[in-house]
Image: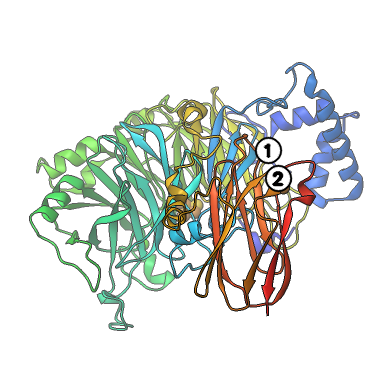
Amino acid sequence: MSDETNHNVRDPTTPPAATPAGEQPGNPARRKFIREAAVVGVAGAAGLALAACGKQEAGKVAGSAATSAAATTASAAKGLPEDYVPPGQLDEYFGIWSGGQSGEIRLLGLPSMRELMRVPVFNPDFTIGWGVTNESKRILGPNFPPGGDCHHPHMTQTDGHYDGRYVFINDKAHTRVARIRCDVWRCDRIVDVPNVQAIHGLRVQRAPRTGYVFANGEDQVPSPNDGRDLDDPKKYQTMFSAIDGDTMNVAWQVIVDGNLDNTEADYAGKYAASTCYNSEGGVTLAEMMQAERDWVVVFNIARIEEAVKKGDFKTIGSSKVPVVDGRHGSPLTMYIPIPKNPHGINASPDGKYVVANGKLSPTVSIIEWAKIDDWFDGKFKDPRDAVVAEPEVGLGPLHTAYDGRGNAYTTLFIDSQIVKWNIADAIAAHGGKKVNYLRQKLDVAYQPGHNHSSMGETRDADGKWLVSLNKFSKDRFLPTGPLHPDNDQLIDISGDTMKLVADGPVYAEPHDAVLVHKRFLMDKIKKVWDVNDPFFAETVALAKSQGVNVRSDNKVIRQGKKVFVYMTSAAPVFGLTDFKVKKGDEVTVTVTNIDPIEDVTHGFCITNYGINFEISPGATASATFTADKPGVYWYYCTFFCHALHMEMKGRMLVEA
Ligand code: K7E
Ligand code: CUA
Ligand code: CA
């Protein structure tokens, strides 16, 4: 352990500075489980020893604990950890995880934290053939910049309840927003957001329905960014964007002062609110930290729509998106000064408040939506008066989650803790009442960014689980080289005190996640593809225009130097055992899985030709390539589908 390089990381073996509820540091429930499951009573200590030094002996003891745990799976639930889900049983929640720098979305089951699926979005993926198939390339666009930087996945809502239609996620690396269908868990649209750089904060309109997807442009750039004003930061600007979630067109943009970090929407459908950490308009770290207060910027949606309707907007460069001016003093926006370089912003599920997390200030700022109404109605002048409390919670507050019982849970990045505090008490204390709003501080390992509670960003917040998405795992897992996994910890918040239940190592870096009860999704998820699904409708229509029924025909069609190869797949055979093309031909192979059976997926790979994609039951998938190498190239099925799966293959014959 090198604490010099990581001065904020506490040694997990020393007690924390403050645990008001008398909690022991670390992970009581899990350690209790390990102790009970192990043959000898030293496994709890061995777990720590393993974490500390990774010695082989400790590994052996931990291994026996794991074996023992597996052996107890058939036994009664007594003594098992809260996250235990027996084999064959389903989890209660879907976890929708950002895949961070991987550019994907991941589906987890909770409370088990088992990874269920990966959904490639901005990243190439050769399991599915994302970036290989024509169907995915139509979504990714001609310039497909490989990769993305995903932070904020959020599901569509209707009146503050999840409605299981879509999930949206940002790509900060290429200034994009993607939409993922919840029925097949596949990305179906990606939009480039013009006029801004680096989409960071993303949220959905909660009411009456989503509606708008709100997206913050983080970094300020010249406008247009075409080489002018290169080193004249005073002329840089950024914007808040509203994307129509149904059409995936950018509906409008709002120029702001400063920059924009995270964003949030209210429960009435009237406002969005974004944090700004750079009210200074600085371009260096020192400049961005000068002011004691930055802002929460509130966007008045009705007024913005009105301005756009009246034609009170401009467009920039070749973009047709209406751009309105929402800078300081504009009637479209409200700038609420709050301390200092704030980061996350989270609306409480009772619909009353929105909390901005202070980051460089040990406070969170509680803003009342009703006061925002009053300010826009001219009932008071100083935007600060919308702040109804500013409780001190600890060092480095980044994000806040809710349990639906009036409590808030804020991640403290610097303290490596989750602080539980009570909203009503914080407001009362702000009003001068002698009341302790702090409920508990729980150590997490280590350096949490986002946290998220079960259903906590909806009216259905149920206060059962909290995940703390920690940036550092340090000594918690077997070593994996210099790059460590993140550590997503599961915390039971159903009682009066938070209890750490499980560690979850995860590939970098799932900034954010949402926990959706399965009742909102189970009846919406398809088990086989609809043969008319829009995802591959264009491919099927092209075939039809050539007189081909993809579900029954196996044939090769030549149009000059273009060759179209159509085949079915049904375990364990492809509809064509071979096809012949000429060197230099542009070849499109279209494969349709006519197996109607759930879970019988085939793959199609042409050896040494860079073609590999998945075809699930009912699906049609295609790929286009140039046959630039003469010879015999076997194509084969890549998904183990049948006892004769190895034999499911054929030959592409490329004539010289
Ligand atoms: Cu806090 Cu991008 Cu939501 Cu990271 S952001 S943690
Ligand atoms: Cu089809 Cu393996
Ligand atoms: Ca600042």
Q: Are discs 2 and 1 less than 8 Å apart at CB?
A: yes
- Out of 207 and 222, give the one closest to the viewer: 207
Q: Is residue 449 left or right of residue 274?
A: right
Q: Position of residue 615 (x, y in %)?
A: 60, 49
Asked whether residue 492 appears in the rendered view, the answer is yes
Inter-mark Cα distance, 2 to 1: 7 Å
Residue bearing the label numbered 1: 26
Report the coloring of the rendering. rainbow
Q: Is residue 149 visible?
A: no
Q: Which image quadrant for residue 324?
A: bottom left
- Which amino acid does the dot numbered 2 rest on? Pro
| Element type at mark 1 | loop
Element class at badge 2: loop
> Residue 300 at x, y = what percent?
19, 47
| Residue assigned mark 2 | 12
Q: Is residue 367 left or right of residue 322?
A: right
Residue 638 is tagged as: none
Q: Is residue 423 left or right of residue 450?
A: left
Residue drawn at (64%, 47%) of the image: 569
